[in-house]
Amino acid sequence: MKLLTHNILTSKCLKGVTVGYPLGIVAKEVKVNEVEFNPEFISRMIQKVDWPALCKAAENLGHSDDLPPAVVDDYENNEEFLKKAHHFLMEIEVINGDLICPETGRKFPVTDGIPNMLANEDEV
Amino acid sequence: MSGRPEHQAPPEIFYGEDEARKYTRNTRMIEIQLVMSERAVELLCLPESQPCHIIDLGCGSGLSGETLTEQGHIWTGVDISSAMLGVAKEREVEGDLLLGDLGQGLPFRAGAFDGAISISALQWLCNSDQKSHNPAKRLYIFFSSLYSCLSRGSRAVFQFYPENSSQVELITSQAMKAGFTGGLVVDYPNSTKAKKFFLCLMTGGQQPLPAALGVDSREDTPNCVVFSQKRDRVKQLRTGKAPKKSRDWILEKKERRRRQGKETREDSKFTGRKRQSHVW
C-alpha cells in the first residue's frame, strides 16, 4: 500500500464512524521502491492530498526525513518539491502492519501490501 | 458448465485459488477482458494525454488494471477475492490493491478519483450471498460511496453481464438514487455473442451518452464464435431419438399410440409430408 493510497483511505464505512480519517499506521515491514516520476500526475495529486496526514503517516513509518512540512507556493513549477512529493507518495510502501481507525480503534491488517478493509456484518 | 457463476457461490469462494489461476491463464478470457477494458476507458472520456487517478472496481487479477497502466494512468483496485488479488500481486501489477466488499461501500475520501471502471463485476452485487444481504441496499451503499469519492465531472463505466432486465432496472435505479446521471450503452445489440453492456454513470449533471458500437449495420461484428446452433443439432443426434416433429418422430409416435391401443390413422405417403409454406 503506497502512502498515496493511505492518504485517501478512511474507515467511514463502519457503523458509528463520522469521519474516520486519517487512519493511523503501525508498520512491521516497509519497502522503498523506484517508481517512474510523473510530474504532471504528482502536481495534480497534490491538490487532493491531505499534506498533514501524509507527514504524520511518513513519521509513523519512520521515513520522514527530507519531507517538506507543508506544500510550497507555486509547487507546479518546483521540480525539487514535486520529486520529493513523488518519493513519499509513490515510492514508500507498507507491506505488513495495521491501519487503525481514529474513532473506534478498529484495526485493518495489511498483508503483503494489501490492506484488508472487509468489515464484519455487525460493523456496517 | 452450469450457467451463471454468481448462482454457484459468492465471489470470494467462486474465485478461489484454482479458479483465479485458470481465469488468468485463459488466453481467450484475457483477450476479451482487454478489449472490454479498452472500450471502458474509451467511454470514460478522460482528458487527452493526462495521467489520471482511477479506481478499478472488482479488479480481480489485474487484467483490466494493466490496460489502465498502459494508457498512462495511476490506479487502485478493490476486490473481494484474496486469491485473485494474490494472482495480481504475482503478476506485479502497478496499481495498489485493496481487499474489500463493494457492497459495504468504498472507504475513500471525497473526490479522491478522476474516474472508475469495472469489468465483469457488477452482476455479483445483485445476489444475496449472506442472509443479512439486501442487494438493493448494498447497491445503494456502493453507488453513493462511489459518487462521493469521485471528483465532480468524472465518470464511472461498468461492463457487466445483466441476467435480465429487472436486474438492469435495479442497478440503474440505485445509481440514479445515489446522484448519478447516465445510462446503458449496448455495443453490438444485434449479435448474441458480441453484445456487451456498459453502464456509463456521470457526476457532472445530465450529458449525452457516448454512441454504441455496431448499431450501424455496415459495421462488422468483431471476430467471435459464429455458430451457436451447431451444438444443439449434435446433441440431438447423440440422444438416439429422432429430432422433434420430423417424419420419423411422427411415425414413432403413431406406433406408440397403437401399442397403447389408441385409435390411430394408417400411415401413408402423406404422413409427415412437408407442407408448402403458406401465408395465413
Image: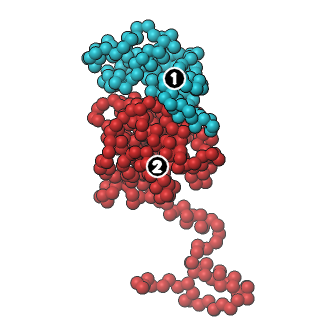
The verdict on a common chain for dots 2 and 1 is no
On residue A3, which mark appears?
A: none
Residue B90 in view: no
Residue displayed at 49% across by 45% down: B140
The chain containing the residue under callout 2 comes to B
Q: Which amino acid is tagged 1?
A: Leu
According to the image, label 2 marks what residue? B174
Separation of disc 2 and disc 1 at Cα?
A: 29 Å
In which image quadrant can residue B47 be found? top left
Q: How is the image coloured?
A: by chain
**Residue A110, quarter of the rendered image:** top right
Q: Amino acid at mark 2?
A: Gln
SS of the residue at dot 1? loop
From the top left corner, tell me how far across and down residue B25 is, in percent: 53, 38
Q: Which mark is residue A23?
A: 1
Q: How many marks?
A: 2
The hue used for chain B is red
Q: Residue furthest top?
A: A65
